[in-house]
Image: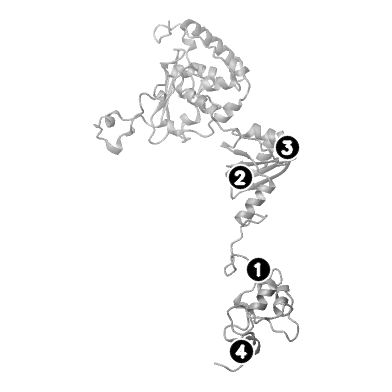
Amino acid sequence: MATSLGSNTYNRQNWEDSDFPILCQTCLGENPYIRMTKEKFGKECKICARPFTVFRWCPGVRMRFKKTEVCQTCSKMKNVCQTCLLDLEYGLPIQVRDTGLSVKDEVPRSDVNKEYYTQNMEREIANSDGTRPVGLLGKAPSSSDMLLKLARTTPYYKRNRPHICSFWVKGECKRGEECPYRHEKPTDPDDPLADQNIKDRFYGINDPVANKLLMRATTMPRLDIPEDKSITTLYIGGLGEDVTDSELRNHFYQFGEIRTITIVQRQQCAFIQFATRQGAETAAEKSFNKLIINGRRLNVKWGRSQAARGKEREKDGVTESGIRLEPVPGLPGALPPPPVSDEDASTNYFNLAPTSSSAVMNLGLPPPPGVAMPPPPGFGPPMFHTMDPMVPPMPPPMAMRPPGQVHYPSQDPQRMGAHASRHGGP
């Protein structure tokens, strides 16, 4: 028979009297200066039915009041929060934690065996140093790949929101914005998450939240190893402003020799190049979706090969140093057309011989003495341009300019009326 407050007065020395609860960061709230009410032997534990000290507090503004639901002995047995009964290390339900660590629950269900088991666990907790869990959980491996992938790195304060206002659901709430409850549509009663039981969560059976997380673990993405064996670089994204070079080196040096670590603060990412391909593969396997530094889950991917990176940079107009080249105004968007052949030039330019200035122009050489340069198509006879001193000479074609030199019309000294002022013109 379960222990009651009135009948079990002879076993009062086993009742719990504590000064502060065992809480996770989500249940405690983001405000470090909160006020709690303490009620000594206020209620029975919902697991072992022994009286314990009940704490009650408000975790934040526009949030509901919360209180401890189980005693500290049951909390230490499972290493869970006294309010939400989620694991203190990973923030996951007990069923998910036990599945990842391959731990089988051993807490008895009957009242007599449960009380005897609880007394033995209290004795083991008193003899331990308090740094590691007790029972089978203390003998389990320290971590699991699945737990590291599913672990919550930041508090989920949305869980502390007020309950839904039942009067608003019926359309009878008259408080408006002053109502301390939520004015939202309630959850579908057929949704499995709407039916949660605190005892099922503690014993790790029939927990809908745990079933949802286990299904998510089976569909999580995987990191494929590239076929190019020359790739030994890993991309680390989501660094933020707190992760430093030394913190990345302290984590990745265990997988192999590191050649270089390059941090791009503007993109909040880093590139870690290993000396060997084996070290890079080991680091990618051990860190993908599991790397957490300073409370931030970092994104780990494989780098790209130098050939693929160079093609993308050329396509995007980016130099090797990472600088994007902007187009220069006034420059042609494409290369000039190829020079006209000798026969076409001789036909178009007054039947000049192949050895005349048209052929010389095609070869990119200056014309010999006495031979005039042919004009570009669309202009008058060549003698008009070669004999008239008032007409400025045309700029050399693109093929005759030295490499690296760009012609700008504003650099021509014969423009803007310079020739007219030299001859005394207006």
Q: Can you say which quadrant of the picture contains the C terminus?
A: bottom right
- How would you rate the neighbour count of disc 3 (Cα within 10 Å): few for under 14, some for 14-19, many for 20 or more? some
Is disc 2 placed on a helix, strand or loop? strand
Identify which residue, 6 or 73, lies in the foreground.
73
Residue found 72% across the figure and 76% down from its top: 359
- Numbered disc in front, either 2 or 3: 3
Q: Position of residue 227 (x, y in %)?
A: 68, 38
Where residue 179 sits, quadrant-wise, is top left
Q: Is residue 134 visible from the viewing direction of this image?
A: no
Look at label 1 and name its amino acid.
Pro
Tag 2–tag 3 contact (CB < 8 Å): no
- Numbered disc in front, either 1 or 2: 1
Distance in Å between CA atoms under marks 2 and 4: 63 Å
Residue corresponding to mark 2: 269
User: Please, is residue 330 above or below residue 28 in the view?
Assistant: below
Distance in Å between CA atoms under marks 3 and 1: 49 Å
Identify which residue, 57 or 341, lies in the foreground.
341
Residue corresponding to mark 1: 338
User: Please, is residue 301 above or below residue 24 in the view?
Assistant: below
Residue corresponding to mark 4: 390
> In the displayed structure, does residue 246 sit left or right of residue 58?
right
Tag 2–tag 4 contact (CB < 8 Å): no
Look at label 3 and name its amino acid.
Arg
Where residue 337 sits, quadrant-wise, is bottom right
Q: Is residue 3 visible from the viewing direction of this image?
A: yes
Where residue 37 sits, quadrant-wise, is top left
Tag 3–tag 4 contact (CB < 8 Å): no
Specify the label residue 277 is tagged with: 3
Look at label 4 and name its amino acid.
Met
> In the displayed structure, does residue 162 sit left or right of residue 12?
left
- How would you rate the neighbour count of disc 2 (Cα within 10 Å): few for under 14, some for 14-19, many for 20 or more? some
